[in-house]
């Protein structure tokens, strides 16, 4: 068994950024299940939020984040996020991330639910790609050891202390074991659980399943964000049409050409994502269509091609010139607000186990993430993990949230489930029953099917079977959390409990023992 001072699982922004900081503290191993650049980060378009503009302040950023989070943000974590943002942006610039500028100043754009323009971007709408390429290049030039195509399958824990991990090399099938007293989970989200998603194929909830199985606390799983505007063209894979397109003036029209958002909310197209996504769902059902349209034809073609070169080119290559024609869009699964519960130092309840990025639940997003706060969350809290590692303090880790009790996932009843367990059925089940508009009946049905499927999972032999195990466990946590929460708040909407309930202003926390 090989020893490293720090083992990092994942090579998105969270994995690479923590690796680059951790290398100054000791030896670092990064394990990643695909190639180094297979991740969600690479697909991020809009940008990264930070209060660096003239008319902005960390207090304004704080207020916008809190109001999007709908009563469930962790105040201390949000304060940390907004206060440390400018310094972390400076770090990214030092690493070489080429943020766009206008007249020598960093260019800032506005996105939904931000009161002022505060989104930095790179390459117009290719922010994630620039960050990923910049960081991965630095990692490749450093002494950090990176093992691609190695899927982590278990976190080894002894008396609540992390001691190592197990993995399989997907190319050879060999089982690997590494020892460390510091393991950072940076495995990203779980968007692949849903039939329609913006997420890359690696987003299968592995980190949540690994942490839960090791005894870590998992929080806020019922809060999953659906992005309102994802390209819906026949035969074309899901492709995000960034929030920033509406920020620059894009309008939503139904199939009859009618601009419908002002009928739902005074913020119209710039309302928070959950409101826009639900409004689109209602409008699609009213008009009997599976799509609506995003209209940018009134904007100058120069603005469109300069600000959204990637989106413009992607659509043009598929026969759609967005400067002249309407963009067919519909909502899709996008971002997991919940995850492995951590404090403001990225620590879980297991000593030596940290979580960073989308797999973690720092509490900054509450029930609904403010656009472009996730890349920021990664850099702010990753830096703090390494500071904690550096100080090597052995503070007793305490739960930070107001938890009354732990929830656990249910034992399956002896119902017969005729639906075959396979990936398309799983994705359809989650989309239909655990999607944008939920009901107790649909959630109960999904919970029962998932529990039964868990009993008949194939043995873990390769990446696909390991991922299926992780997806079922993650789906169970998400579905059962959504079933417990009998109210609507943020991204979690129950048509049988459409109102917010003050006694539910608390977190749902799962633990396996
Ligand atoms: C299309 C799209 C657009 C977005 N736009 C924005 C935006 O404009 N602004 C913003 O702030 N956020 C945006 N987001 C969200 C943001 O990009 C992600 O939340 C963020 O990039 C997550 O980074 P991460 O490092 O946590 O995860 P990822 O980038 O997804 O990386 C996860 C890594 O973990 C690896 N991994 C997973 N499981 C295992 C395992 N078992 N063993 C080994 N390795 C494993 C994966 O291979 C991958 O390398 C967007 C997301 C998408 C999908």
Image: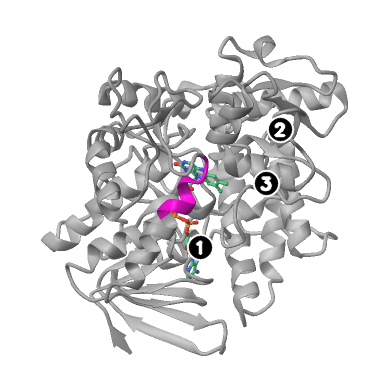
Callout 2: SS: loop
Q: Distance between the residues labelled 1 and 2?
A: 41 Å
Callout 1: SS: helix
Give left or right: position of 315 versus 26.
right
Instruction: Place residue 305 in its image quadrant.
Output: top right
Q: Distance between the residues labelled 3 and 2?
A: 10 Å
| Above or below 246: residue 224 | below
For label 3, the crowd category at 10 Å Cα-Cα, with few meaning under 14, some 14 to 19 and many 20 or more, is some
Label 3: which residue? 314
Q: Position of residue 156 (x, y in %)?
A: 37, 76
Label 2: which residue? 322
Asked if the stretch drawn in magenta spans residue 127, the answer is yes
Residue range in magenta is 125-131
Q: Which of 422 and 50 is in front in this view?
A: 50
Q: Give the residue drawn at x 40%, y 54%.
A: 217
Q: Distance between the residues labelled 1 and 3?
A: 34 Å
| Above or below 173: residue 164 | above
Q: Where is residue 291 in the image (x, y as percent from the top left)?
A: 79, 32
Which quarter of the image is occupied by the C terminus?
A: bottom left
| Above or below 158: residue 470 | above
- Nearer the observer: mark 1 or 2; the answer is 2
Callout 3: SS: helix
Q: Is mark 1 within 8 Å of ligand 1?
A: no
Tell which circle, 3 or 2, labels the residue nearer the N-terminal end: 3
Tell which circle, 1 or 2, labels the residue nearer the N-terminal end: 1
Marks 1 and 3: CB-CB under 8 Å? Answer: no
Label 1: which residue? 209
Tell which circle, 1 or 3, labels the residue nearer the N-terminal end: 1
Q: Can residue 111 be seen in this view?
A: yes
């Amino acid at each position: 068994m090989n020893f490293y001072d720090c083992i990092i699982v994942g090579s998105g922004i969270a994995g690479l950024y923590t690796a680059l900081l951790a290398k100054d503290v000791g030896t670092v191993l990064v394990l990643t299940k695909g190639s180094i650049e297979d991740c969600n980060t690479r697909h991020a378009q809009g940008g990264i939020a930070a209060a660096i503009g003239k008319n902005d302040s960390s207090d304004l950023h704080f207020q916008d984040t809190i109001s999007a989070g709908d009563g469930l943000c962790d105040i201390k974590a949000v304060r940390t996020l907004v206060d440390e943002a400018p310094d972390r942006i400076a770090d990214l610039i030092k690493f070489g991330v080429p943020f766009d500028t206008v007249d020598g100043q960093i260019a800032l754009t506005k996105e939904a639910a931000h009161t002022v323009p505060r989104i930095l971007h790179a390459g117009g709408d290719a922010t994630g790609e620039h960050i990923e390429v910049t960081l991965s290049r630095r990692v490749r030039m450093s002494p950090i050891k990176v093992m691609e195509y190695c899927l982590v399958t278990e976190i080894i824990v002894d008396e609540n202390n992390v001691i190592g991990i197990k993995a399989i090399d997907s190319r050879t099938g060999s089982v690997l074991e590494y020892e460390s007293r510091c393991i950072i989970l940076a495995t990203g989200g779980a968007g692949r659980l849903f039939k329609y998603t913006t997420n890359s194929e690696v987003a299968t909830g592995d980190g949540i399943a690994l942490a839960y199985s090791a005894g870590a606390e998992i929080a806020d799983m019922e809060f999953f964000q659906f992005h309102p505007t994802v390209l819906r063209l026949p035969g074309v894979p899901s492709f995000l049409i960034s929030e920033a397109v509406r920020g620059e003036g894009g309008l939503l029209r139904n199939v009859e050409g009618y601009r419908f958002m002002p009928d739902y909310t005074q913020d119209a197209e710039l309302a928070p994502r959950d409101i826009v996504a639900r409004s689109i769902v209602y409008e699609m059902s009213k008009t009997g269509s599976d799509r609506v349209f995003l209209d940018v034809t009134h904007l100058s073609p120069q603005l469109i091609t300069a600000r959204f070169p990637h989106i413009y080119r992607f659509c043009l290559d598929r026969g759609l010139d967005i400067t002249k024609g309407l963009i067919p869009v519909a909502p899709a699964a996008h971002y997991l607000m919940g995850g492995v519960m951590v404090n403001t130092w990225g620590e879980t309840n297991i000593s030596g186990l940290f979580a960073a990025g989308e797999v973690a639940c720092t509490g900054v997003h509450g029930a609904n993430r403010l656009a472009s706060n996730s890349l920021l969350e990664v850099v702010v809290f990753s830096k703090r993990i390494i500071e904690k590692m550096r100080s090597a303090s052995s503070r007793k880790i305490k739960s930070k949230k107001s938890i009354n009790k732990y929830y656990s996932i249910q034992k399956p009843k002896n119902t017969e489930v005729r639906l075959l367990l396979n990936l398309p059925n799983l994705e359809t089940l989650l989309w239909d029953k655990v999607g944008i508009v939920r009901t107790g009946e649909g959630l109960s049905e999904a919970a029962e099917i998932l529990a039964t499927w868990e009993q008949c999972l194939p043995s873990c032999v390769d990446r696909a079977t390991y991922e299926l195990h992780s997806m079922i466990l993650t789906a169970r946590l998400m579905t059962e959390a959504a079933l417990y929460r009998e109210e609507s708040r943020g991204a979690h909407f129950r048509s049988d409990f459409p109102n917010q309930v003050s006694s539910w202003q608390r977190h749902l926390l799962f633990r396996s023992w």
